[in-house]
Every structure is written in C-alpha cells, then in structure tokens.
Amino acid sequence: MQAQNDLPNRADTLRGTLSHYRTCFDVTHYDLMVSVDTLSQTIWGENTITFLSVEDFTTLQIDLFDNMVVSIISCENHTLSYHREFNAIFIDMHRPVQSGERLKLTIKYFGKPIIANNPPWDGGFVWTRSSNNQPWITVSCQGIGASLWWPCKDHLSDEPDSMDIHCQVPKELMCVANGQDRGIDYDTEGRKICHWHVSYPINNYNVSLNIGDYVHFSDTYTSPDGSHLPLDYYVIRGNEHKAEKQFKQVKPMLKCYEEFLGKYPFWNDGYALVETPYAGMEHQGAIAYGNKYKTGYLGSDMSGQNLKFDYIIIHETGHEWWGNSVSAADIADMWIHESFCTYSEAIYVECMHGYDTAMTYVNALRGRVQNKAAIMGPYGINREGHYDMYVKGMLFLNTLRHVVNNDSIWWPTIKSMCDTTFKYSTTDYKNVVAFFNQKTGLTLDPIFEQYVKHYKLPTLEYNIKKTKRGTSTLLRWKADTESFNMPIICIVDGIPHHMNISDQWIRVKSNAPLEFDSKHFYYDLRKVKRTRN
C-alpha cells in the first residue's frame, strides 16, 4: 500500500479506533434538537442518545469537536462528569452499566461550528444569502465528521436505527432535514421548530440541515410494481420553474436504478432534492443539489459525449444505494461508497443510451486518474483512500464486469449486493471480496487487492518474436499482488479471445501481432525484452 505522508497522532486514533469506550454500546436512536442563530453564526443544541449496552462498562466515548462547548451531560436524572481529549468526550456513568441495558444519555452544547471554506470538499457550515437576500445556511461534513456540529458516536460502524431532528429557525425561513416532514411547532418567541424523522439507519455524515427561503413542490414516481414514491423538491424562491424542468430527470433515473440496483432503499421516508449553495452531497433522503440547473457538472460535460444529464442528480442519487444503504464500517473503505456510486453513473448511461455509449463514458476520464496512492485507506485512524476512488473505482468495476464476462451473473451480483446482502448495513473490504467470490464462482482476491490496496495498475508485459510462420507473443502480468492473475480480451488474428494471464509467461502464436483490449479493461501495457523468471 501507499504509505501516508504523515503519521497518525492521538487525535486520529481517538476518532478512528474502536476502543472499548466505543464498542461497549450500540446507538439505536438520536433525538437531536438544534437552534441556529443566523446573525452570530452560532448554534446551541441538545442530543438525546438512546443506546443498548453490549458490554459492562463505567465510561464511554462520545465525539464533539473541541471548539464546541459542552454545558451538561445527564443520564437517569443524574449529571455526569466527563473529561475531554481532542475531539473526544469520555463520560463517566453515575453507576456501572450492565450488558443488555437500554439507556438514554443527553448532551447539551453550544458554539460556533467550523465554517466550510470550499464545501463540500471542505466540511463545515455554510453561512450565505440566497438571491433574494435571505439567510441560507447549510452543512456538509463527509470525511471531517458530523461531530463538528453535533455530539454523536462519530464512527461509520455504528448507525442509529432511526433518528429525529428538530431545528429552530426564524419564522420566515424553513429548515429541511432528512426523512419525513413531521410538521412545525412554534416557541414562545414565534420561532419555527421544524421536525424531521428518519425511519431507517443513517450514517452520521448524512445528517443535514438546510435553512433558507425554500419553496416546496412535489411529484410522484411510480414503480413498475405499482407502488408510489413521493418526490419532494425544496428550492430557493424564484427557482421553481427552472427546478420543475430540471428535475424531470429524476423519474427515468429512478426507473433505471430500480432495474439494476433494486427499489429506492428509503421508500417510506421519500426522495428529496434540496437546493444548496454548494455543488452537492448525498444526504440521505434530502440530497443536496447545487448544480445551478445545468447539465454535466456545473455546465461541464466531463464525458465529452453531450449526454445532457445533470451530473449531481445522477451521482448523488446513486449514493442512496451506495454509501447510504450499503455503508462502509470504516472510513478507510470509503471507496465502497464512491467507486460503486461512480459506477452507477455508467449504469445509468447504459440504461438510457446503450452499452457502447456507457463504455465511452467509463473511459472518458481515465486521464485524470493519478495512480499515486491506494483508493483504500488505513483502518483505525479515520483516513480514507485517494481521490482516485471515484474514476479509478469505476474503471476497476468495469474491468471486473468483463473479467466475469457474463452479464447474467454480473448484474444480479450488483443488484443483490445493495438490494439484499448489504442493504441497511455496514460492511468492509473483506466482506465485499468474499461476496463477489461467492456470487461469481471466481477467486477475485488478487484483482481486488491490486486495484484497491495498491496504487499501481497491473502491467501487462509482452514480448514479440517474429518467425517464418507468423508471430509468437509472450505475455505475463507484473503486479504488486503476489500470484496476480486476470483474464483480458486479446484480439488474435481478428478474433477476440477471453484469455487468462498470470504472472508467468504464456505464449500465443498468431499470424499477425496481437491487439489488446484497453476499452473494457483498465491496466498498463509495456513491451519488454524477455528475461529469465
């Protein structure tokens, strides 16, 4: 694997490691109340954490960035003592907790959360104004962590089974959060308290607040099985007509994804797009949309094919399956979210425009892949892999499809991965590889290891020798993974052959030089002089 440039420190391990202080309890529900002051750019809040103890313990860890102030922590009407270390809070329970107990822990806090300088790539709050000069506040925190603005067990391995979100805002504004709209209450000062309920597991970085002068309109998607999914759209006042036109892409997209990935996974909570001042983010059931009603990515057609679809709608919706339903148990496996989601773009293109167009789409951005660091990060220190996990991940999965070389196996494998096997659950590299091995009947460990754990591509080395009877070509793989083998398609005298190649030389005789398929497989190619093994 590619070594990290900087060594992990104590703060990294506190955040990334599942110590006894975290494994001793399982969060089942968060009930979060947040009040937002648009003038001072501060928040105060209260989170009641319902958890099941799975071990005996006296101390547990909750995470909250150290620039946020804790005012009180309580449980069973007792005020609890605690100490803080970096962004971790170690809470001493008022009594020994026994395995199997279900308790509620309440944390009250306040402060000025980190401001995002370049959202969503740089996490934090965004405080801006919409075109009609109304306050517009949003948040994104993938990578940096939800604990930058609310106290939680900030590790991807533990998702609550459900969640309630209450947000207090000025009466002229609306707060859109995740899941189902449970209505509005008003406090004694006339401020709105918007209540949202998430009835499915949700990973922490997907929890979102979107506050602004929103206008709501709706539509309905009808599944091929006849069931109806509510579609809710929240856009800044004045953008309704542009949104109504742009969001017509949603229903055909959902139909494609349903065919290949299974029904929209959060059916009971509904599907929503929420306009944001940044490009986009996969917030579960409340997808952040900021593509300015343009095609491609902010008007740029990255594939060069003039396909005229809105990249943010297609990509971020793909995350409802990959990342939100099928979730990594450690940020090191964020490639599971991003590689499979980026591949879902190719699925959409193939569904809408056919196989050949999809293959062109897959290969359009291969020049942007750096191959300088692994797409998988190190476990236990809260670090994800390289940004290559997007495009390289898509190219890898397209390669894997053609290694399997049987779409009647490939597509059911992809669908069952997110529609049954890992639905609403967390997983990791090891389980994903085992799943593909089992479903395809192949041993794919060396291929996964090379593309995911190592940064270099496998290199197909070849040596050509011309003879009186034609051409003799020697082939082998050169890779970081021991005993690497992977089939590719070689064109021998005009005929494609799905040929298995290992790290040992094999000889192919032909009348003319071989041609190598680099459209359906992603690898390096190098002509060498043959050397002894």
Image: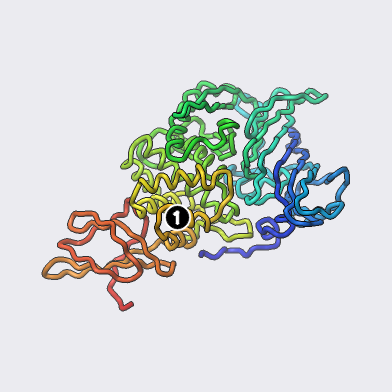
Foreground residue, 447 or 528?
A: 447
Q: Quadrant of the C terminus?
A: bottom left
Residue at image position (62%, 44%) is: 203
Residue at image position (70%, 30%) is: 195
**Residue 187 percent coordinates (x, y):** 80, 25
Residue projecting furthest to the bottom: 532
Asked whether residue 195 appears in the rendered view, the answer is yes
Foreground residue, 318 or 428?
A: 428
Residue 273 vertical position relative to residue 109 in the rendered view, above or below: above
Report whether 436 appears left or right of 9: left
Q: Describe the element under mark 1 as helix, strand or loop.
A: helix
Residue 147 vertical position relative to residue 472 in the rendered view, above or below: above
Foreground residue, 260 or 281?
A: 260
Residue 88 vertical position relative to residue 201 in the rendered view, above or below: below
Q: Which residue is mark 1?
A: 438
Dot 1 amino acid type: Gln
**Residue 95 percent coordinates (x, y):** 86, 53
Report whether 182 appears left or right of 107: left
Quadrant of residue 253 in the image?
top left
Report whether 453 appears left or right of 157: left
Residue projecting furthest to the left: 468
